[in-house]
Image (cartoon, rainbow, N blue to C red):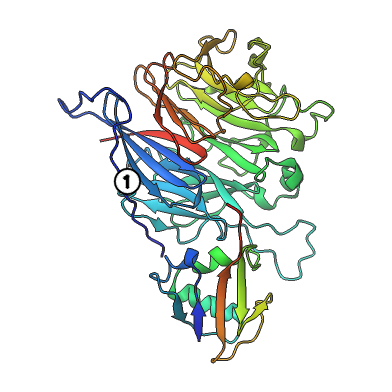
């Protein structure tokens, strides 16, 4: 499926805005992103498997807070940087 | 893997041209970590002119940049951004390219359904980097916020929790809560390795006291006797001890100095009690501050930078008059060193990692301010010159000699 990568993470995706990745859930999608772009997952998800405070995930436009959220191959996942003070 | 290339700029901030180049000499390198990136300052052997290289990691919060003194080429940078988690970058070409650590410092994951009373933690930022003992090439230590101790054995590529303190119930109690730390999070810092023995080490926590191991981190004991705490708190509670910066004297590793939230201290091992040598500082200046700098060859000599720790803790230079203080007799008497520094209305201060010395003779001193200025002295503090200004808030300054 297509995944939108926010600007702070594009150094991992060779500056690509949209990348292809697979997963039956948001968690496995992030595992696949990590496999393709080593190091990217820990910048978004901490060691306790929690989303970091200023990273947001949207599936087909709806914000998702649960890494176990199931995904279908035609879903569109947006990873977005939330506002974070200067 | 996130690799980056820095832009380069040239500058000649000081008025005197270098007389370098007549013979091959080691050149000084000053490493700056700031709230918005890192910069490298390459000096001539006389330390008169400086070439600025950077920014590296523009916009990243960089807490510490260190060069490995054992190989003279490995640079580590502890970084995070406002949005992304913490990591460590590594360069072996003086910052031309950087590669991210394959496994940055991170706490152990709490087991699923764990009944442990210890709250699962995540590293907010790596705060402190210390190269390991000379006999252990590739070994590095890292201190984090919230307080955690980590070690790498491969030059900073992979990191693992070190020594068990991160999940030890007693240590977790001493680390306190978020309310017991500094404004941007409680920190583990001042990781010191005895140059005579890689198994003899110290670390400090803000808050959480000073700790010593004689067996390579297998066991630890507290080293807080003689240290004072904020009025009204009980010094028997380790959580209340706030050492800001502890340094070991290279010329006499049995002597350590400490800039604490509550004064300047010295300890002579095997003694177990800190002596508040800051009591002999001028009363109107006091002995509160963040950094502590020791002389590379003289264990009676050190430099501090007092700040205003009165009333609401302004954390500025006292009366807006920045000054370094030095002692030549282990803290019995102090001299003010402010020649060249602003004479009025300079309301900045220096953070705990942002003041350092080189190993030359006479010793060069360097400090970076919260207002983004880099100052240097080529004569042990007698005269100060501003090398650079308008940088972001400076978090750490380190020096090295490069071929």
Asked whether B377 or B134 is in front, the reply is B377
Say which quadrant the N terminus of chain B sits in: bottom left
Q: Can residue B272 be seen by looking at this rendering?
A: no
Give me the residue at 76% from left, 66% from top.
B114
The chain letter for the residue carrying disc 1 is B
Q: Could you tell me residue B149's position as x and y percent?
A: 59, 47
Q: For the point 20% across and 26% down, which residue is it?
A: B20
Q: Would you say A65 lies left or right of B200 here?
A: right
Pinpoint residue B237: horizontal percent, then vertical percent. Answer: 80, 34
In which image quadrant can residue B261 be found? top right
Q: Which residue is mark 1?
A: B94
Residue at horizontal 36%, vertical 20%?
B378
Q: Position of residue B181 (x, y in %)?
A: 70, 41
Locate residue B50 relative to residue B126 in the image: left or right.
left
Where disc 1 sits, the SS reads: loop
Q: Is residue B154 above or below residue B392?
A: below
Q: Is residue A78 above or below residue B224?
A: below
Residue at 59% across, 43% down: B217
Q: Is residue B149 visible?
A: yes
Q: Nearer the viewer, residue B176 or B365?
A: B365
Image quarter of the C terminus of chain B: top left
Label 1 crowd bin: few (<14), some (14–19), many (20+), radius 10 Å: some
Spot the residue most to the front. Answer: B345
Residue B229: percent from the left, percent from the top?
A: 76, 27
Marker count (numbered): 1
Quick check: A66 above or below B204?
Answer: below
* Closer-to-camera residue (B178/B359): B178
């Amino acid at each position: 499926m297509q995944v939108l990568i926010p600007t702070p993470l594009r150094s991992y995706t060779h500056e690509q805005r949209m990348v292809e990745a697979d997963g039956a859930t948001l968690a496995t999608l992030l595992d696949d992103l990590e496999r393709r772009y080593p190091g990217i997952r820990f910048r978004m998800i901490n060691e306790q498997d929690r989303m970091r405070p200023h990273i947001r995930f949207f599936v087909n436009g709806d914000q998702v807070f649960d890494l176990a959220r199931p995904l279908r191959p035609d879903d569109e996942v947006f990873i977005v940087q939330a506002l974070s003070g200067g | 893997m996130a690799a980056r290339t820095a832009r380069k700029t040239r500058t000649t901030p000081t008025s005197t041209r270098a007389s370098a180049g007549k013979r091959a000499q080691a050149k000084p390198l000053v490493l700056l970590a700031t709230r918005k990136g890192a910069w490298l300052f390459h000096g001539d052997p006389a330390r008169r002119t400086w070439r600025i290289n950077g920014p590296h990691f523009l916009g990243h919060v960089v807490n510490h940049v260190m060069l490995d003194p054992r190989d003279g080429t490995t640079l580590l940078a502890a970084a995070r951004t406002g949005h992304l988690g913490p990591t460590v970058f590594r360069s072996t070409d003086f910052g031309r390219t950087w590669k991210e650590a394959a496994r940055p410092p991170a706490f152990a994951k709490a087991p699923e359904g764990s009944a442990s009373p210890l709250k699962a933690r995540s590293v907010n930022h790596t705060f402190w980097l210390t190269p390991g003992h000379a006999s252990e090439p590739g070994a590095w230590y890292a201190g984090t916020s919230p307080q955690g101790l980590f070690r790498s054995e491969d030059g900073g590529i992979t990191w693992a929790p070190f020594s068990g303190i991160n999940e030890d119930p007693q240590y977790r109690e001493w680390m306190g809560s978020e309310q017991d730390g500094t404004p941007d999070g409680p920190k583990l810092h001042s990781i010191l390795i005895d140059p005579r023995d890689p198994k003899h080490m110290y670390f400090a926590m803000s808050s959480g006291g000073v700790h010593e191991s004689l067996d390579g981190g297998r066991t630890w004991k507290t080293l807080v006797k003689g240290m004072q705490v904020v009025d009204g708190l009980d010094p028997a509670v380790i959580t209340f001890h706030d050492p800001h910066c502890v340094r070991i004297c290279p010329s006499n590793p049995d002597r350590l100095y400490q800039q604490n939230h509550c004064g300047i201290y010295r300890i002579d091992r095997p003694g177990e009690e800190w002596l508040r040598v800051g009591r002999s500082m001028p009363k109107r200046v006091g002995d509160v501050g963040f950094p502590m700098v020791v002389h590379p060859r003289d264990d009676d000599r050190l430099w501090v930078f007092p700040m205003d720790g009165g009333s609401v803790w302004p954390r500025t230079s006292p009366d807006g008059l920045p000054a370094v203080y030095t002692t030549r007799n282990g803290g019995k008497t102090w001299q003010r060193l402010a020649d060249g520094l602003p004479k009025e209305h300079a309301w900045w201060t220096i953070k705990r990692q942002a003041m350092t010395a080189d190993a030359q003779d006479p010793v060069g001193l360097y400090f970076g301010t919260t207002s983004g200025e880099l100052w240097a002295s080529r004569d042990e503090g007698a005269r100060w010159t501003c090398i650079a200004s308008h940088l972001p808030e400076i978090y750490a300054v380190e020096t090295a000699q490069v071929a």
